[in-house]
């Protein structure tokens, strides 16, 4: 089985991505298992941050690495929280409160806005080695709207506030297999899987 480093320690993200890579006989290993610290994410775009994280993990492990940079882009907030989605309401009362604090801030910012259109964006970068001159880069986008209150118990991040307008359900109400079909990360991963078939890591 081929090994691929995930430039993240997010367990829920690991489970989502690992399940999609399994049919290609690829084992996804979170970087923390190999002692790789989190990379800096100083860039204003998803693509630059994803690539920086993938190169960082590959340089410290000597293995191919995959990173995704994802976020919620809200029209009425000029694309915010965007690349700052995970730390939108920082500093947090406690790390365990991060999702709750981010969601509360988003609702406050949208309190007087009529336009609640938003999209989840995911950019995935895969490098075969740290200096790979031809990284594989794919993107997915999931369009929807921001709800007025959280709904559902599944998922993480902004899932309880993101309305999938096709199903009429919050992302946090969708079964995992349905979410993987609809989501920005699922879309990006399907493109990546197509590119990886027949390609050596």
Image (spheres, rainbow, N blue to C red):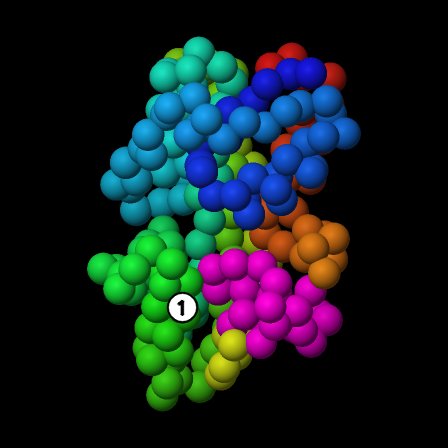
Residue at x 36% of width, y 88% of height: 112
- Which residue is labeled 1 in the image? 100
Residue at x 51% of width, y 25% of height: 5
- The residue closer to the viewer here, 91 or 96, is 96
Q: Residue 169, image x and y in percent?
A: 67, 73
> Total of numbered circles in the picture?
1
Residue at x 52% of width, y 59% of height: 156
* For residue 39, side relative to residue 54 (left or right): left
Query: Per the image, is 153 magenta?
Result: yes
Q: Residue 175, image x and y in percent?
A: 72, 60
Residue at x 65% of width, y 47% of height: 186
Does residue 111 sit above or below 96 in this rendering? below
Does residue 72 sit above or below 165 in this rendering? above
Query: Per the image, is 179 magenta?
Result: no
| Quarter of the rendering occupied by the N terminus | top right
Q: Residues within 10 Å of mark 1 (few under 14, many from 20)?
A: some
Q: Is residue 200 visible?
A: yes
Q: Residue 192, image x and y in percent?
A: 63, 33
Quadrant hosting residue 99: bottom left
Does residue 138 sit above or below 158 in this rendering? above
- The residue closer to the viewer here, 11 or 53, is 11
* Magenta-drawn segment: 151-174
Q: Residue 57, image x and y in percent?
A: 40, 24
Q: Is residue 77 visible?
A: no
């Amino acid at each position: 089985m081929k090994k691929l480093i995930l430039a993240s320690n997010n367990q829920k993200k690991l489970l989502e991505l690992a399940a999609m890579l399994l049919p290609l006989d690829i084992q996804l290993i979170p970087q923390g298992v190999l002692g790789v610290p989190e990379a800096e994410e100083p860039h204003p775009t998803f693509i630059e941050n994803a690539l920086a994280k993938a190169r960082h993990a590959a340089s410290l492990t000597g293995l191919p690495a995959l990173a995704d940079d994802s976020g919620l882009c809200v029209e009425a907030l000029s694309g915010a929280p965007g690349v700052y989605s995970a730390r939108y309401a920082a500093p947090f009362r406690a790390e365990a409160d991060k999702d709750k604090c981010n969601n509360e801030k988003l609702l406050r910012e949208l309190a007087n806005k009529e336009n609640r259109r938003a999209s989840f964006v995911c950019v995935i970068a895969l490098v075969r080695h740290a200096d790979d001159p031809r990284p594989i880069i794919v993107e997915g986008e999931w369009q929807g709207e921001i709800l007025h209150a959280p709904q559902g118990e599944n998922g993480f991040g902004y899932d309880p506030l993101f309305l999938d307008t096709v199903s009429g359900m919050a992302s946090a109400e969708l079964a995992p297999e349905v979410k993987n079909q609809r989501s920005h990360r699922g879309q990006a991963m399907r493109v990546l899987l197509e590119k990886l078939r027949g390609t050596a890591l």
